[in-house]
Image (cartoon, helix red, strand yellow):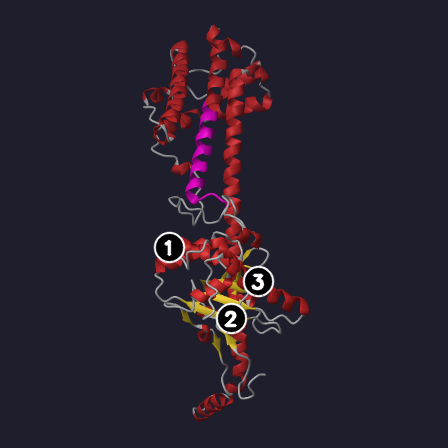
C-alpha cells in the first residue's frame, strides 16, 4: 500500500545501477502458470546444484528465491538472456517496475573492480547480444561455435573473461543461486537501497511551500510531484532510446561485416572471370569488352598502385571501428581487424583482376599490330571491341615513366602474392614497351 504521507510512488533510479553490477531477480507473477514456473525454477536450481556437484547451494546461506539474473551495463541499461535471446533493456523496464507484476530484485556491487575489469566484463557480455537463449547447454559439455546463452551462464562468462571468475564452476554449470551465494561474500555489497528513492513526504513539500511563500515565489510546489514524474518519464524515454541505439549498433556492424564479405566474394568472382577470359578470349561478349575498355582507361592509375606503401586510401573507413582490434565485438561476427583484412583482400583481388583485363586489351591490340603467334589466341576478338580498346588506351608516351617504376607492391601482404603482382606488372610493362617499339613514338589509335 502506498504511503499516504508521500506525494507519489517510489522512484526507480536507473542510473544508480552501474556497469558490472549483478541484478538478481525474483519474479512475482499473478497467474498460476507463472507461479508454477517460478517454483520449478527456484527449486530446480537447488536440485541441479546438488546433482552437479561442486555447487554453492550451502545450507548456511539460504536461497533467496531468485530465478533470474542480469548484468548492469551502465547508463541505466542491463543485459540479460531473457528466455528468448540476449537483450539490452532499461533496468526498470526489465524489472517491470511500477507494474502489477513488478519483480523483486537485489543489486550487488564489487567496489574492487577496476575500470579495466568493468570494461572487459561489459564487452564480454555485449558480445552475446541477440544470441539465442538455451538452458539445455547446462546438461552438456561446452561446444566450439556454441553462441547460445542463459542468464547466469552469460554473467559467469563475462566475469571469467575479465579474469574475475565467481567460482571454479564452468560457465554453463553456473546458476543464479551460485551468483547469489557469491554476492554474499566480500567484497560484494548489497546496493539495492541506492536504486529505489522515496518520493518527497507531505511534510517536506509543506516546508518547501513555506520557504517559497516567504521568498515571494509562485506557488509551484503544488506542481512538484507532476514535474518530478514528467522528469522521470523524460529520462526513461532517453534511456529507452539508448537501448535502441545498442540494437542499431549491432545491426550496423552486422551490415558492415556482411557488405565487406559480399564485396570480397564478388571481387574474387570478377578475378576468376578475368582469368577465364584471358585463357579463352573467344568467349568475350560486349559487356566483358566494356570492362576491358574501362580497365585500359585506368592503366596509368593501375600501374601507379605498384609503388603505394599501402592501400589505406583506397579502402572505406567505417567510423568507430578500431582496425587493430582482433577481438570480435559480437559472437559469430568477424573482428574489426578481420574486416580490414577482407577489405584488403577485396581490393587486391580487384586490382589484380583489372591488371588481367589490361593484359587482355593490350594483347588483343598487339595481335592486330604484330600478328605474332604469341598473341594468336586473341585473333578471335571482334574488330569493334578492338577499336574501342585502341581508342581509349592512353598514349604509350604517357606510360613511359612507369617502365622504370619499381614493382614494389609492399601492400601485397606476403611474398607469394607480391610475386604474382610483380609478374603481371612486368608483363604489362613489356607489352607497353612493345607498343612503343612498334610505333617508335606515342601510339596513335587512328592508325
Circle 1 — which element?
loop
On whether residue 335 falls in the magenta region, the answer is yes
- Residue at 52 percent of width and 41 percent of height: 259
Q: Which residue has dot 3 on it?
A: 44
Tell me where residue 299 sits by quadrant.
top left
For the residue carrying disc 1, how many other residues have a C-alpha within 10 Å: few (<14), some (14-19), or many (20+)?
A: few
Q: Nearer the viewer, mark 2 or mark 3?
A: 3
Q: Earlier in the sequence, mark 1 or mark 3?
A: 3
For label 1, the residue is 163
Q: Which residues are magenta?
A: 332-355
Kindly report the distance in space between the C-alpha atoms of the residues bearing marks 2 and 1. 27 Å
Q: CA distance from mark 2 to mark 3?
A: 14 Å
Q: Say above or below: 281 vs 236.
A: above
Q: Position of residue 283 (x, y in %)?
A: 59, 17
**Mark 3 residue element:** helix
Q: Is residue 258 above or below residue 208?
A: above
Q: Which label sits in the foreground, 2 or 1? A: 2
Q: Residue at x 48, y 65 (%)?
A: 57
Mark 3: give few (<14), some (14-19) or many (20+) Cα within 10 Å: few
Would you place residue 193 above or below residue 300 in this image?
below
Residue that badge 2 annotates? 64
Front of the two marks 1 and 3: 3
Amino acid at each position: 500500500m502506498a504511503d499516504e504521507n508521500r506525494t507519489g510512488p517510489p522512484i526507480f533510479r536507473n542510473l544508480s545501477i552501474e556497469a558490472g553490477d549483478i541484478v538478481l531477480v525474483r519474479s512475482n507473477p499473478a497467474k498460476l502458470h507463472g507461479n508454477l514456473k517460478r517454483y520449478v525454477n527456484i527449486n530446480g536450481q537447488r536440485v541441479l546444484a546438488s546433482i552437479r556437484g561442486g555447487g554453492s547451494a550451502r545450507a548456511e546461506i539460504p536461497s533467496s528465491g531468485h530465478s533470474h539474473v542480469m548484468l548492469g551495463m551502465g547508463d541505466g541499461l542491463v543485459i540479460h538472456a531473457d528466455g528468448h535471446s540476449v537483450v539490452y533493456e532499461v533496468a526498470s523496464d526489465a524489472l517491470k517496475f511500477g507494474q502489477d507484476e513488478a519483480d523483486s530484485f537485489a543489486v550487488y556491487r564489487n567496489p574492487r573492480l577496476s575500470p579495466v575489469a568493468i570494461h572487459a566484463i561489459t564487452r564480454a557480455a555485449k558480445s552475446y547480444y541477440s544470441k539465442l537463449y538455451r538452458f539445455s547447454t547446462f546438461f552438456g559439455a561446452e561446444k566450439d561455435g556454441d553462441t547460445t546463452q542463459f542468464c547466469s551462464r552469460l554473467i559467469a562468462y563475462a566475469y571469467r573473461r575479465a579474469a574475475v571468475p565467481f567460482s571454479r564452476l564452468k560457465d554453463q554449470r553456473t546458476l543464479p543461486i551460485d551468483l547469489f551465494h557469491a554476492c554474499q561474500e566480500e567484497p560484494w555489497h548489497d546496493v539495492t537501497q541506492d536504486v529505489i528513492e522515496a518520493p518527497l513526504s507531505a511534510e517536506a513539500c509543506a516546508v518547501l511551500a513555506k520557504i517559497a511563500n516567504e521568498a515571494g515565489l509562485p506557488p509551484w510546489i503544488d506542481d512538484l510531484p507532476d514535474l518530478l514524474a514528467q522528469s522521470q518519464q523524460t529520462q526513461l524515454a532517453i534511456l529507452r532510446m539508448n537501448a535502441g541505439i545498442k540494437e542499431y549498433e549491432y545491426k550496423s556492424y552486422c551490415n558492415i561485416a556482411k557488405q565487406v564479405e559480399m564485396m570480397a566474394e564478388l571481387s574474387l568472382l570478377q578475378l576468376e572471370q578475368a582469368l577465364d577470359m584471358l585463357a579463352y578470349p573467344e568467349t568475350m561478349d560486349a559487356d566483358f569488352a566494356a570492362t576491358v575498355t574501362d580497365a585500359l582507361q585506368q592503366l596509368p592509375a593501375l600501374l601507379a598502385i605498384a609503388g603505394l606503401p599501402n592501400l589505406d586510401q583506397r579502402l572505406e573507413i567505417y567510423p568507430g571501428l578500431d582496425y587493430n582490434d582482433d577481438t570480435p565485438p559480437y559472437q559469430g561476427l568477424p573482428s574489426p581487424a578481420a574486416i580490414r583484412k577482407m577489405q584488403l583482400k577485396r581490393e587486391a583481388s580487384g586490382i589484380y583482376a583489372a591488371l588481367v583485363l589490361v593484359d587482355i586489351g593490350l594483347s588483343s591490340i598487339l595481335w592486330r599490330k604484330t600478328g605474332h603467334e604469341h598473341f594468336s589466341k586473341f585473333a578471335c576478338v571482334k574488330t569493334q571491341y578492338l577499336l574501342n580498346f585502341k581508342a581509349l588506351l592512353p598514349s604509350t608516351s604517357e606510360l613511359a615513366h612507369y617502365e622504370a617504376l619499381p614493382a614494389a607492391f609492399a601492400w601485397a601482404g606476403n611474398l607469394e602474392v607480391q610475386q604474382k603482382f610483380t609478374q603481371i606488372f612486368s608483363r604489362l610493362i613489356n607489352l607497353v614497351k612493345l607498343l612503343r617499339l612498334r610505333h617508335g613514338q606515342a601510339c596513335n589509335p587512328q592508325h
